[in-house]
Image (cartoon, rainbow, N blue to C red):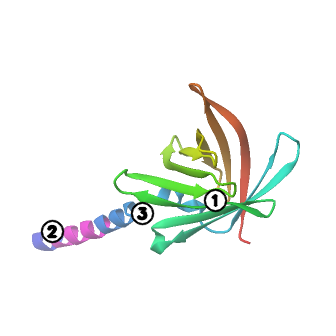
Amino acid sequence: MKRLVTLVLAISSMGLRAQVTSAAADPLAPIAWLAGGVWHGEVQGPDGKTTKIETRVARELNGKALSFNSSFNGVMQYEGFFAYDAAKKAIVFTYPSADGGLAKGVVTSKDGSLLWDFDMTEANGSVNHFQVHTVQDGSDDYTWALFALRKDDWVKLFEIHYHRTQT
């Protein structure tokens, strides 16, 4: 009887270990909720005009990456990807912009939100440091706020509420 109990416990713990390992095996889990459907947002510019934003995020390469693209008023502006960098032990992202810029950064979970910390190299070679704070609100909504580093302070530039539809 003692052997049977030991065997059952051993098998149970292997199953539990496999579940824990498979759950922990997805390093993109903190951002996986972004995949699927179309995210819609609007932002008003300094000129008072509204820009409509559509972003699509999809799992790629057997789930090892997430690709994304964003259009403003129907014109493609960004295409990029997220992937896990095992050497940095971080989710990284990069994307070029339609105007020749290039963004590179990392995404981390912080206080129930996502923190995107990145440098944007503009087409003229200048580099600016930004952060985005993303707060998920249910399965189909989130708030995205852009901050710029000005001297030693983070200054909020604007905020967008996104809603996901399936088309």
**What amino acid is at disc 1?**
Ser
Considering the numbered disc 1 on the image, is that residue within a helix, a strand or a loop? loop
Quarter location, residue 97: bottom right
- Place residue 75 in its image quadrant: bottom right
Q: CA distance from mark 3 to mark 1?
A: 19 Å
For image coordinates 29% across by 64% down, the residue present is 17
Q: Is residue 28 visible?
A: no
Query: Could you say which disc has been placed on residue 6 in the image?
Result: 2
Q: CA distance from mark 2 to mark 3?
A: 31 Å
Of circles 3 and 1, which is in front?
A: 3
Q: Amino acid at mark 3?
A: Asp
Say which label, 3 or 1, has the lower sequence index. 3
Residue position marked by numbered label 1 in the rendering? 139
Q: How many marks?
A: 3
**Is 120 colored magenta in this rendering?**
no
Q: Which residue appears at 52% of the width and 40% of the height?
A: 111
Read off the magenta span: 6-16
Q: Residue at x 52, y 71 (%)?
A: 60
**Residue 15 left/right relative to 36:** left
The outermost residue toward the front is: 124
Q: Look at the image and say whether residue 8 sits in the magenta stretch.
A: yes
**Mark toward the viewer: 2 or 1:** 1
Residue 27, image quadrant: bottom left
